[in-house]
Amino acid sequence: MYSQGQIMNQAKPVPGSFKRNPPIAGEAEAIEAAKNGDAEAFSKLYALHKRRVYTLCLRMLGNVSEAEDMTQEAFLHLFRKIGSFRGESAFSTWLHRLTVNLVLMHLRKKGLQLVSLEETINPSEEDAPKRDFGARDPQLAGSVDRVALERAVGSLPPGYRMVFVLHDVEGFEHNEIATMLECSTGNSKSQLHKARLKLRELLRQSEALPLTALSEVLQ
Amino acid sequence: MTDPGTQLNLEGMTPDDFQARLPELFAAGSGRISEDPRFAKFLHDNPTCEALVRDLEYIADAARQLLDPVTDEPSDAVWDNIQSKLKIAAVGEEPV
């Protein structure tokens, strides 16, 4: 019988899977210790990853209270499942995938079908991005700050926001997103494109208005 | 002339054709349409498409910057709850 450590050493890392999530100093030791039930090591993993897990939950749910609940669930789930982490991807990628699946399960339990059926991923017509091939627009590049983008992402319809956060922020591939959201890869690509179009529209609106009106536009 | 990679007729492509294929084009390769020499002439001849591509690439680039650093963090109550649930589970009173 193999120990978890041996299995971890045998696993082949997926090329490129560590690019966005490079290993953190001391993380590997903490993971191995946590697998053996070391509470202090688990506490260290919490300290290392709580912000990104919480931010991921917050971006997906748009609600502080629910995001905290899901952060708690994610780490409790991590405690139970950490023995199955084999090091094939970066730990944070693995943890984020676990978190995303929990959030999606939570949303489905709530009866929100926005992530389970293709038709419900699509927002209403009024939320959909407008096709835009009119006059040449002023350049957006270089003019959008982090806060404005966060606000705009927060105001996206849930289906668009989900795919945008998973692909463009978290770095998941379309096939992974399709599996998680139970939709086709084509649908994931299409939703991502619509999300970016909608963000462009929101960001351009916010640029055209004084700062005081920004929050109203992005509500 | 049909491009074998995209199956697009790059000579006769209209802005509508281009927009319809954008989700696939962005998903293919590096996702940097503005740097793909196959589309250089089309984008040069269609400034609105060029502006659209530039903005969407910019949004995708900016999104990557949202991953780090993150400043939001959960309240201390979250860790307190986790610890208390793990302690309860450890003494076998309740499964985690």
Image (spheres, coloured by chain):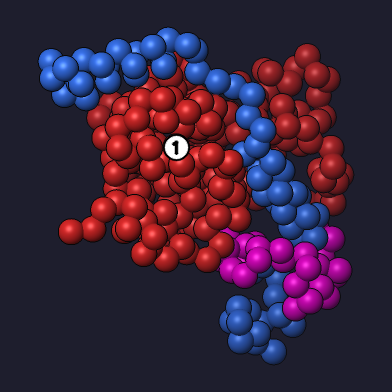
Asked whether, in this view, residue B35 is left or right of residue A217, the answer is right
Count neighbours of disc 1 (C-alpha within 10 A) and say few if under 14, some if 14 to 19, many if 20 or more. some
> Which chain: red?
A
Q: Quadrant of the N terminus of chain A?
A: bottom left
Q: Position of residue B14 (x, y in %)?
A: 71, 71
**Residue where numbered disc 1 is placed:** A30
> Which chain: blue?
B
- Which amino acid is tagged 1? Ala
Q: Position of residue B90 (x, y in %)?
A: 20, 21
Q: Residue furthest left?
A: B93
Residue under the image location 34 percent in, 52 percent down: A5
The kind of secondary structure the magenta stretch mainly shows is helix
Residue under the image location 77 percent in, 65 percent down: B34
Find residue A19 and report its image quarter. Answer: bottom right
Stretch of the chain drawn in magenta? B19-48
Asked whether, in this view, residue B23 is left or right of residue A162, the answer is right
Asked whether, in this view, residue A144 is left or right of residue A102, the answer is right
Q: Is residue B58 magenta?
A: no
Residue under the image location 46 percent in, 41 percent down: A29
Find residue A218 and report its image quarter. Answer: top right
